[in-house]
Image (cartoon, helix red, strand yellow):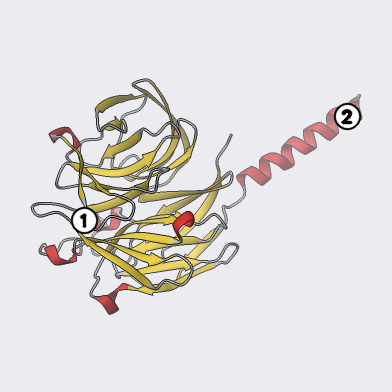
């Protein structure tokens, strides 16, 4: 019995050490990347948007470095926000926007599509007239594209096979709409980066506010994690949470804590954390300092 107890204790200690080990890190090959969004293919490739470079980076599954895969500057792009890989249609969706801190350039504000295997351009869809910002993207099971419009207080929609982006849901409550993700039941979840709110929008476009179990701070990128759950990055609260939606309640569980997180991706039971070091752009004490090398890294989902 004593031997069994000693063995069990040793196993637990080793298990704890393994759990506490440094997360797997993928370095991004570039300077001033400020990686704002990240997505993953079904095969585990990581695709990262550079808000500071106008490039999209890719790391093959298991690789230690992400390199420039799509050089958006060759087509006039200056900054990328949301990126979303859709394996079923072999398409990468990416939001082109005006550079952070610079004057608005409406012509840059559009949804671009690329071949998910080769990176070749496929399509370009301008945002609707008026104030609009293409921030993040999610697709429903039918293949329709939904876009969080941060400055327009809307969720936009590009129908599968369509050529023009239209309004799906609009409300002053959606001001600052940022992260966006679908639950398995077809409800769309949207967070707001400026006001720290969570909303559920059903397929008919009806909006319901959710009550989160924690106060949101700098709510940013989101990704579905199965069933009625999704993962969310919060730069202001310095954490990644998994959120479970039940009715109008949103129960939050902290997966990982880290300042500057802007996005998240899920590969199996592994959470990939996108630390875009947004705090170096927003915090007066850090602004202008060298943010150093940019990277993404993995942590366990924890369930």
> Is residue 256 shown above or below 123?
above
The x, y position of residue 246, in whole percent, is 41, 22
The answer to whether residue 29 is visible is no
**Residue plotted at (8% across, 52% down):** 130
The answer to whether residue 41 is visible is yes
Q: Nearer the viewer, residue 125 or 198?
A: 125
Name the quadrant containing residue 194.
top left
Give the tally of numbered discs: 2
Q: Nearer the viewer, residue 152 or 67?
A: 152
Task: Of the two numbered discs 2 and 1 on the same chain, state the one appearing first in sequence.
Answer: 2
Residue 64 left/right relative to 153: right
**Residue plotted at (48% across, 54% down):** 88
Mark 2 crowd level (few <14, some 14–19, many ≥20, 10 Å Cα): few
Residue 204 left/right relative to 28: left
Residue 196 left/right relative to 238: left
The x, y position of residue 205, in whole percent, is 25, 33
Name the quadrant containing residue 29.
bottom left
Judging by the rendered image, the residue that carries numbered circle 1 is 164
Q: Nearer the viewer, residue 250 or 170?
A: 170
Look at the image and tell me in which quarter the C terminus lies: top right
* CA separation in Å, label 2 and label 1: 66 Å
Nearer to us: label 2 or label 1? 1
Under circle 1, the secondary element is loop
The residue furthest bottom is 74
Judging by the rendered image, the residue that carries numbered circle 2 is 4
Look at the image and tell me in which quarter the N terminus lies: top right
Mark 1 crowd level (few <14, some 14–19, many ≥20, 10 Å Cα): few
């Amino acid at each position: 019995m004593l031997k069994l107890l000693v063995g069990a204790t040793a196993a637990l200690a080793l298990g704890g050490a393994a759990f506490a080990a440094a997360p797997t890190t993928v370095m991004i090959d570039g300077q001033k990347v400020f990686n704002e969004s990240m997505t993953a293919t079904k095969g585990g490739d990581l695709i990262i948007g550079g808000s500071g470079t106008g490039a999209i980076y890719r790391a093959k599954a298991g690789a230690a470095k992400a390199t420039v895969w799509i050089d958006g500057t060759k087509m006039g792009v200056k900054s990328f926000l949301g990126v979303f890989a859709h394996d079923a249609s072999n398409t990468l969706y990416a939001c082109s926007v005006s550079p952070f801190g610079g004057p608005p350039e409406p012509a840059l504000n559009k949804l671009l599509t690329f071949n998910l295997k080769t990176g070749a351009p496929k399509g370009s869809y301008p945002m609707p007239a008026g104030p609009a910002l293409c921030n993040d993207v999610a697709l429903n099971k039918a293949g329709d594209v939904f876009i969080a419009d941060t400055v327009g207080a809307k969720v936009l929609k590009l129908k599968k096979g369509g050529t023009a982006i239209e309004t799906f849901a609009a409300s002053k409550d959606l001001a600052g709409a940022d992260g966006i993700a679908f639950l398995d039941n077809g409800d769309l979840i949207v967070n707001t980066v400026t006001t720290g709110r969570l909303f559920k929008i059903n397929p008919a476009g009806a909006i319901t506010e959710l009550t989160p179990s924690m106060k949101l701070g700098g709510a940013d990128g989101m990704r579905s994690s199965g069933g009625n759950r999704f993962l969310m990055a919060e730069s202001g609260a310095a954490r990644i949470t998994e959120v479970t939606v039940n009715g109008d309640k949103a129960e939050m569980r902290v997966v990982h804590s880290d300042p500057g997180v802007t996005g998240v991706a899920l590969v199996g039971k592994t959470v990939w954390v996108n630390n875009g070091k947004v705090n170096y752009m927003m915090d007066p004490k850090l602004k202008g300092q060298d943010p150093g090398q940019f990277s993404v890294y993995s942590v366990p989902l924890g369930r």
